[in-house]
Image (cartoon, helix red, strand yellow):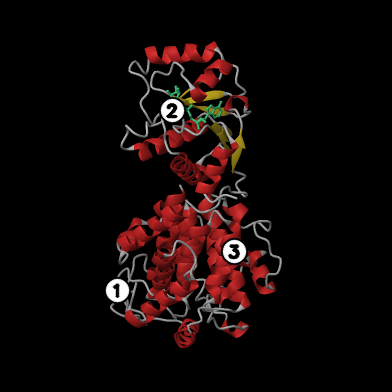
Amino acid sequence: MQKNKIIGSLIGLAVGDALGAAYEFKRPPYNINENYITGGVHNVSIGEWTDDTSMALCLAQSLIDKNGFDTKDQMDKYLSWYEDGYFSTRSECFDIGNTVARALASYKNTDEPFSGIAGDNNSGNGSLMRLSPIALYYYQDKEALIKYAAQSSQITHKSELAVDVCIYYAQLIAGAVKGYSKEELLSNEFIDTKDMRKEVINVMKGSYKEDKVYKPTGYVIDTLETALMAFYRFDSFEDGLLHVISLGYDTDTVGAVYGQLAGAFYGHNGIPKKWTNALIKYNLLYSTAEELYNNSSVQKVNFNDEMHKKIHILVGDITTINSDVIVNAANYRLLGGGGVDGAIHRTGGSKILDECKFLRKTRYPDGLFTGPAVATTAGNLKAKYLIHTVGPKYRFDSNHVELLESCYKNSLMLADDYKCESIAFPSIATGIYAYPKDEAAKIAYTVINKLLVNTRYIKDVVFVFYSQEDANIFKKSNHIK
Ligand code: AR6
């Protein structure tokens, strides 16, 4: 779900830009075509996008290359776009906003990335138009999202209005990626307005709901208001986009701004194929968005407060844990053994063994392979279910990484299918099966951290270690304090 939304946001930006490009600076009323057309001030071809998308691609690529936010690298990439046509549809840059051009000139002279132009008079929409990669990369980490949305503007647009709008809009896009409804996203409670400029608060509080003439000029407040009006008023990506572009003025940018949010909300599947298919460099846009997704889902956050999902680390005996699901590091025979398996069968009692024997007679006559997961009663344990999974034997299974990933993934998803809210894992395969504890720690944490955003029911994941030393290895391997 998140992937469709992340790709939708970047492609949506480009589609809005490309559809609007041929109408830039036109005054309404005029007829718009439901397909791309050629022409306009830059004489664009069918599906050709402009500076909004080029800059968004530079920003996305920088987040990917640098594994996070790096102002200097972003400015270097913007400069190579400006000077050499990097991420342009042509061999050169053919469209650039004044504020961006001034900031880049200043950066070239001073080497100072925070070269943004300040003041209300410089509140153009040039930092908003390229914003979505920030939201797509940091959607799980609210603090970083706000900080970097602001800084991503400040390097070219230091105006408080431009910065506040970026802070606001990045949170809307992130919320849309997470699956919030329109009502939730647009409610007064969704975003903290403290310290925001009153012009921005006025829009947030609903000026976009008014029945009036919207004029999407290059002023960031106008752009924001028009994009939100369309997002609020229409029920599809297509209808909202056609409407904002029919209003004239800065059509490509209001299209791109609307497209970032609407694309995240309706997802890639919600954008008409006639528009995605004809988009220039569609594959590049798609693969960049996919890479953003792959990177963003393994953010350095160890839990997501907003979604109330948490990863806990506990030291103790897993058979005493109070959790909906307990995972057993079993062996293929499913009939008990040493280590955690032995402890679980001893404490859990004979009902577990009876069900395991039944499974062996029915579904698993040859035993359970390494990687899959199967649920049984939890017997006398304080859990609703016991999930059995067989870890890889480190020295014998050459594909031990994939197998260990599968153990965690399949157990988590099975618990979610059973509508459970909490799950406790032992350190699978790190005992008798001799998986090095630091390597296993990284795999376990990365897989769970990545998948936890997608669970419908599971909110708490507990990693249970038999000793403090093992818990410390886990923390150290994953840079957890
Ligand atoms: N609670 C929490 N963790 C425990 C407990 C416990 N009660 N007991 C051990 N550990 P292992 P494996 C830790 O050997 O490597 C069995 O015989 C332990 O310190 O149980 O996947 C099965 O039947 C270690 O870090 O599982 C299989 O034949 C981790 O749990 C084979 O062992 C896993 O150690 C599976 O080997």
Q: Nearer the viewer, residue 12 or 134?
A: 134
- Choose mark 3 or mark 2, whichever is in front: 2
Q: Which mark is residue 45?
A: 1
Q: Nearer the viewer, residue 316 or 103?
A: 316
Query: Between marks 3 and 2, how big is the CA–CA gap?
Result: 46 Å
Neighbourhood count class around disc 2 (C-alpha, 10 Å): few under 14, some 14–19, many 20 upward = few
Picture coordinates of residue 191 (x, y %)?
A: 65, 60
Q: Which mark is residue 279?
A: none
Up the image or down, 464 lies above or below 134; here it is: above
Query: Between marks 1 and 2, how big is the CA–CA gap?
Result: 64 Å
Q: Secondary structure at mark 2?
A: loop
Question: Do callouts 1 and 3 mark residues in contact (Cβ within 8 Å)?
Answer: no
Question: Do callouts 1 and 2 mark residues in contact (Cβ within 8 Å)?
Answer: no
**Amino acid bearing label 1:** Ser
Location of residue 421 (image quadrant): top right
Picture coordinates of residue 342 (x, y %)?
A: 51, 19
Query: Between marks 1 and 3, how big is the CA–CA gap?
Result: 36 Å
Residue drawn where x is 51% and y is 61% of the image:
135
Task: Say which label, 1 or 3, has the lower sequence index.
Answer: 1
Task: State the residue position of label 3.
Answer: 146
Q: Is mark 2 within 8 Å of ligand 1?
A: yes
Q: How many marks?
A: 3
Question: Do callouts 3 and 2 mark residues in contact (Cβ within 8 Å)?
Answer: no
- Whether residue 259 is visible to the viewer of this picture, yes or no, is yes
- Choose mark 1 or mark 3, whichever is in front: 3
Task: State the residue position of label 2.
Answer: 432
User: Would residue 470 appear left or right of 292 to someone viewing this image?
Assistant: right
Q: Secondary structure at mark 3?
A: helix
